[in-house]
Image: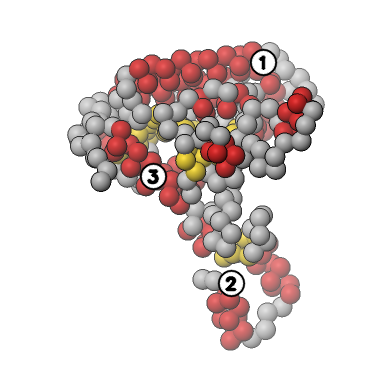
Amino acid sequence: MSLFDWFANRQKSGPISKDRQEREIADGLWSKCEACSVLTYTKDLQANQMVCPDCGHHNRVFSDERIRQLIDANTWLPIDAELVATDPLQFRDRKPYSDRLRDMQEKTKLNDAVQTGVGRLDGLPVALGVMDFRFMGGSMGSVVGEKLTRLIERATRERLPTIIVCASGGARMQEGMLSLMQMAKISGALHRLQAARLLYVPVLTHPTTGGVTASFAMLGDIILAEPKATIGFAGRRVVEQTLREKLPEDFQTAEYLLQHGFVDAIVLRTQLKPTLARLIRLHQPSASTHLPIHLTEARSLSMTIPD
């Protein structure tokens, strides 16, 4: 239903009070685009995977929704969901780190900033990790590093292609060096995955920065990004102050990185699942024989050669 149709239907049924309009917007019936300010019927926006139908702006989505968008229904098997961070440094800021973790867990219903699991994408078995920016800015601590490493190691054993959807502010400062160690740990696991000639595709979403960019986000065989996603290591102001010069307006955007060879393709969210499926079919000649029972008997995948 378009905005015009909605108003046309309401005019037939009589005038609409200002209070009623404000109440319906407040109740979430309509969503206002952050980029173009156009109002869209929320159900239509959700059906379009939270991409504005008017200007194409990609609204931020979180891990549960990402999994629903990419994984076939009733095939998702989460792994290592029980892992929970501790407070090894007894970090104190305005609030103890342990309290912040507890608050985030209650607010997001997640144990940490990534969900990992195996499932089927357009019928193809995959290992998938999805970072969640709601949980402390998607920061990478020991649990994020451990879960992604275990996911990659499982994919290597079961010969599965691996996809990681990145959304992070970088390494988690509350865990200090233990957080930075995850960069090397995940990178080492990816080296073994790629040595086994298995496909790894990172999907860079808004934002992908810091230690995540400096490690597994840029180690893919094929690197995909969403339109206008912010991708970088240090912040724009830090880079400008260090170089003592003004940077281009599109600096650290997906489009800038594509132009300079750091990203292989920018893919609309609505086209991400079929694009990933095609890449897997092109690069994965055969599937694992060790898939979980719920994914059914593994079957061979014939390599497709494009016309």
Q: Is residue 285 left or right of residue 140?
A: left
- Whether residue 135 is visible here, answered yes or no, is no
> Marks 3 and 2, how far apart in space?
31 Å
Give the mark count. 3
Q: Position of residue 126 (x, y in %)?
A: 35, 34
Kindly state the secondary structure of the residue where label 3 is placed. helix
> Marks 1 and 3, how far apart in space?
37 Å
Kindly state the secondary structure of the residue where label 2 is placed. helix
Q: What residue do we see at 65% from left, 67% from top?
A: 24
> Marks 2 and 1, how far apart in space?
49 Å
Can you tell which quarter of the image residue 241 is in?
top right
Mark 2 vs mark 1: which is more N-terminal? 2
Q: Is residue 283 above or below residue 40?
A: above
Name the residue nearer the viewer: 108 or 165: 165
Q: Is residue 257 above or below residue 16?
A: above
Q: What residue do we see at 50% from left, 15% from top?
A: 185
Tag 2: amino acid:
Leu
Tag 3: amino acid:
Thr
* Residue bearing the label numbered 2: 3
Question: Which dot, 3 or 2, sits closer to the camera?
Answer: 3
* Residue bearing the label numbered 3: 275
Q: Position of residue 244 (x, y in %)?
A: 79, 28
Tag 1: amino acid:
Gly
Q: Is residue 8 above or below residue 60?
A: below
Name the residue nearer the viewer: 201 or 249: 249
Name the residue nearer the viewer: 61 or 252: 252
Q: Position of residue 84 (x, y in %)?
A: 55, 23
Q: Mark 1 Cα within 10 Å, few/some/many (few <14, many 20+)?
A: some
* Residue bearing the label numbered 1: 176
